[in-house]
Image: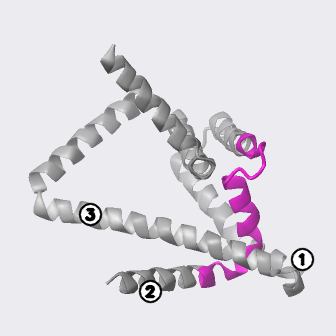
Amino acid sequence: MPDNASSEKEKHMKQLKRKMECWREVVLPLNSILLWERPWYPALILGLTTTAFCMIWMLEPALLTLISLSLLVLALVDYFVPTIISIFCTADSWTGQKEKKLNEICHNLSEAILQLQSLWISIVTMRNSRPNFYYGIIIIFLVLFAWLGNTINNLLLSYIAVNAILLTPGFKYKGRARSAVKYIHNYLIQEKLS
């Protein structure tokens, strides 16, 4: 059984690597930024997201306009980036070290995708096996999110969520998330003891 699971993971990783083939020259620097391989990368991430959200805040586009413009930018990037990469980056510039790094990125990304799929399957299983518990949790979270969305500005919530998503890989890679959780855990235990 474990061999079957590992072969499934390997197959998923190879499919992902094949899909990312034309983006490989972009994926390596992007991974470097998300994992904070230089000390100023978190500031770069926060600066870019802050600039984007300030522009949205100042322009105040309608939701449909914002979605359309975002999808337009994604479509243009999807069209132009592979073309530009094929012009400027030759096959000779791709080294074994870059290939190893791309394999590592694909492996980590594949594991994250499979973990999200496993989480989704466990939620669906809980829905079928324990519907009262499932619906109780869903109702509590949705009411909490509705209250939070009504209390706090939606653009601010989006800004915080985007920054949290973009900074999470760096926190995990640097081990700062684990140390923060330990600090909070120790603080709460000390509060209970005193």
The residue type indicated by label 1 comes to: Phe
Give the left or right position of residue 90, taking residue 74 as reference.
right
Viewer-nearest of discs 2 and 1: 2
Q: Splitting the image into 4 quarters, where does residue 185 fall?
A: top left
Where, quadrant-wise, is the N terminus in this rendering? Answer: bottom left
Of residues 131 and 77, which is closer to you in this image? 131
Of residues 55 and 7, which is closer to you in this image? 7
The residue type indicated by label 2 comes to: Ser
Magenta-colored stretch includes residue 42: yes
Q: CA distance from mark 2 to mark 1?
A: 36 Å
Mark yes or no: residue 95 visible.
Answer: yes
Q: Main secondary structure of the magenta part?
A: helix
> Which residue is the site of mark 3?
122
**Of pointers 2 and 1, the one earlier in the residue sequence:** 2
> Which residue is the site of mark 1?
88
> Which residue is the site of mark 2?
7
Name the secondary structure under disc 3.
Answer: helix
Q: Is residue 73 above or below residue 114?
A: above
**Bounds of the magenta span?**
17-44
**Of pointers 3 and 2, the one earlier in the residue sequence:** 2
Mark yes or no: residue 82 visible.
Answer: no
Residue 187, position in %: x, y?
A: 43, 24
* Picture residue at 77% right of the left edge, 73% below the top: 25
Of residues 193 and 28, which is closer to you in this image? 193
Q: Is residue 109 above or below residue 89?
A: above
**Of pointers 3 and 1, the one earlier in the residue sequence:** 1
Where, quadrant-wise, is the C terminus in this rendering? Answer: top left
Residue 100, position in %: x, y?
A: 71, 77
